[in-house]
Image (cartoon, rainbow, N blue to C red):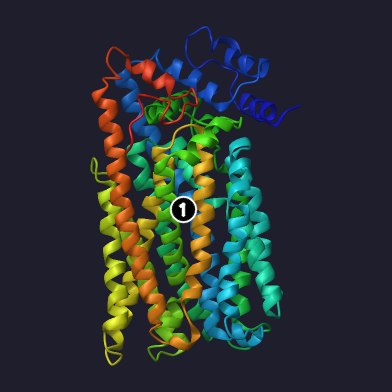
Amino acid sequence: MSTAKSVDEAVATSLPDHDVGTSTDMEKGGLRSRILGQRIDLNELGKTYYQQSLQYDEEQLKRDAIKVRRKLDFIVLPMMMTTYMLSFLDKQTLNYSNAYGLQADTHMKGNNYAWVSSALYFGWITGAYPWQVLLQRYPVGRLIGVMLFVWGAVCMLQAAVFNFSGFFAVRFFLGLLEAVVSPAFVLLTSMLWTRDEQSLRTSYWLSVNGVSSIIGALLAYGAGHAKGLAVPQWKLIYLIVGAMTFAWGFVIFFYLPDGPHNAKMLTEYERVVAVWRISQNQTGLKHNVIVPEQIKEALLDPKSWLLFLMAICLGILNGGTTNFLSAIIAGFGYSPLKTSLLQTPVGAIELVMVILLGYVSKIPNFLGATIIISCLPGFAGLIGILKIPMTHRFALVGMCWMQGVLGSPVILNWTLPGLNTAGHTKRATVLGVYFVVYCAGNIAGPHLFLASEKPRYPTAIKGLAGSYGAVMVLQVIYTAYCWMENRAKARAGLLDGVSKDEVALEGFEDLTDKQNKHFRYRI
């Protein structure tokens, strides 16, 4: 039996026996019979749900859509936020544990720490595309749930290593596991929220990086005060975070939905409404079959390459600031405990600014401009680190805090492949390559920091500033290209004489953004 068939049967058995409405298709378990009786993917299921929505009054659907959105916002979104917080907290543990003798205990020398920082992204780059294939074929929620169990155990294994090679190996496998989280959440967000809502919801689940930074800094600060431990303080951090991750895996495995079709917090009617809500996205739900022609289109699309270039630059920025922020602050003359405490405002700034700029991105035709604006604080902060005299230590720390805004351009740029790429194989290809090159940037970022250039690291700071500049220029080009494509489609009058329902149903046909003449890019 094929995988696609198994998925379809799982979806079918999750449907209740009673009918949703009065239509023939849904009476007496008609939809269940249709799914079990033929090979059907989630796009076909979505189309059936949408057709069922047509029997209801549109005003009623609009009222109920608000209730459905609130359920998703207050139940599913917090689950995604907590999972992402743990993911980022795990990445940050290396940064925090470095202040408590990690390098001395594991006998690291020279640039060993930089290579350990990069090891996670070597694992991520290895798993980025394979995870995309698995996400297209298997249920998203169950896949992440299983991954969390293994991920938590591997995280705790970091407390058992005693040398550079062992630490590198464990961090590699940790990255291999974590590579699924970001693309899975981009996919799930596109299946549960409308295109106008996605940038803000994505900003919410990435904004918890700020919460993670605060928790991680406080955890490191608390570990620094712990006395009489059976293990070194830096190992305690890994044990705590790993145990939290493993426990959270149970919640995700049993409750995180794979899409609107099996969200446990929604009634059967509300699932119909949820599909009706996202029908305007023109991206459907999910198609389990790999379409080679869409891979070719993805790799020949100029938009894809603009995204890949921005991903490299954002990866360099993320890899550099995430792993070396504590080293920069410590270089200004602060003790390990003070360094840990001084990093807490970075998280607060990230939390506030990512959400604030997420709201700004909802302004019509302002997403690209928001990404550019969100690059400016970090860019200014890097210049300040390079130019402000060392006697003004607190001002220099303030420039480091401004790097917390980096989360906003990162996450808003992550939304672009999901928002502006239709066709599930094409979107999986773009997302897969996007995160591969993003990881490559994360690997390169820490190696800009040369040990001989402490504490300002001028080579690294100039490289990061150049990356910010490149992102802004590339985003201008990307936005202009999408605007011209929208304008060309509008001038062709492609929507003339086409009903709204016909346009919505076409979105479930697994057409690419270029094939679907009614698709409009979000700028």
Residue 439 to residue 112: above or below: above
**Quadrant (top left/top right/bottom left/bottom right) for the C terminus:** top left
Query: Residue 70's x, y, as percent?
Result: 38, 39
Q: On the rendered structure, is 323 left or right of 250?
A: left
Residue at x 39%, y 21% (from the top left corner): 504
The image shows residue 333, relative to residue 216, as above or below, that is below
- Which residue occupies the foreground of this view, 167 or 256? 167
In the image, 111 versus 225, the foreground residue is: 111
| Residue 30 point in image, percent of width and height | 59, 12
Give coordinates of residue 200: x percent, y percent.
34, 47
- Residue located 60% across and 82% down the image: 102
Which residue occupies 63% across, 64% down? 243
> Height in image: 27 above or below 306?
above
Q: Give the structural element (helix, strand or loop) at label 1.
A: helix
Asked if one can make out residue 203 in the rendered structure from this viewpoint, the answer is no
Badge count: 1
Crowding near the residue tagged with mark 1, few <14, some 14–19, many ≥20 C-alpha atoms within 10 Å: many
Residue found at the very far right of the displayed protein: 1
Task: Identify the image quadrant of the N terminus.
Answer: top right
Q: Identify the image quadrant of residue 404.
A: bottom left
The three-letter amino acid code for the residue at tag 1 is: Met
Residue 149 seen in the figure: yes
Q: Nearer the viewer, residue 402 or 221?
A: 402
Instruction: State the residue position of label 1.
Output: 81
Which image quadrant for residue 31?
top right
Determine whether, in the image, residue 247 is placed left or right of residue 347: right
Residue 357 location (% of width, % of height)? 28, 54
Considering every residue shown, the one lying at the far front of the view is 300
Q: Residue at 64%, 14% (x, y): give it.
A: 33
